[in-house]
Amino acid sequence: MMIKVYGIKNCNTMKKTFDLLESEEIDYVFEDYKKTKPSEEFLNHVIEKIGLSSVVNKKGTTYRKLNEEDKLQLEEVNTAIPLLIQYSSMIKRPILKSAVGEFIVGYEEDQIRKLK
């Protein structure tokens, strides 16, 4: 099974991730949230494995533009998932899924290199 990379193609962190994967000759498949919205099943699975706080990007512009009511909805899984599907740019990037089903969130160079 190949590495899966989830994110948004034009993000600078994603570009660094792609460069690292290619320089390390690590094969991967890319899922672009802008082309295909993340599914509820995918988000449930990732949140179950790594936690909601590891998935929601609270530092980005999209999060900062939300009203307080929506921000509160991001504190609970059942109300956060619909918002994350609608505003997929609020999902931390990248999310990598290893061949054995483990997740790496963010540009973690040492962990990504170990995916070989």
Image (spheres, rainbow, N blue to C red):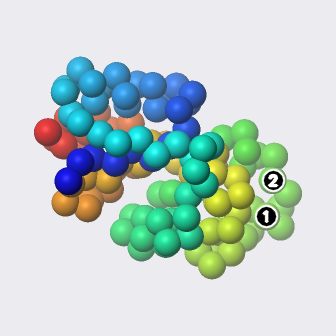
Residue 47 in view (yes/no): no
Residue 32 in view (yes/no): yes
Callout 1, which amino acid?
Answer: Asp
Residue for point 47% across, 57% down:
54
Does the residue at mark 2 contact the one at mark 1 (Cβ under 8 Å)? yes
Image coords of residue 52 (percent x, y) = 52, 66
Closer to the camera, 94 or 4? 4
Residue for point 34% across, 22% down:
19
SS at badge 2: loop
* 26 lies left or right of 51: left
Image coords of residue 37 (percent x, y) = 60, 54
User: Which residue position holds label 1?
Assistant: 70
Q: Residues within 10 Å of mark 2 (few under 14, many from 20)?
A: few
Closer to the camera, 56 or 11? 11
Q: Is residue 67 above or below residue 92?
A: below
| Image disc number at residue 62 | none
Image coords of residue 69 (percent x, y) = 83, 67
SS at badge 1: helix
Callout 2, which amino acid?
Answer: Leu
What's the CA distance linking mark 2 and mark 1?
A: 6 Å
The quarter of the rendered structure image containing the C terminus is: top left
* 4 lies left or right of 106: left
Image quadrant of residue 40?
A: bottom right
Image coords of residue 33 (percent x, y) = 57, 47
Q: Is residue 3 above or below residue 80?
A: above
Q: Residues within 10 Å of mark 1 (few under 14, many from 20)?
A: some
| Image disc number at residue 66 | 2
Residue for point 70% across, 53% down:
87
* 115 lies left or right of 61: left
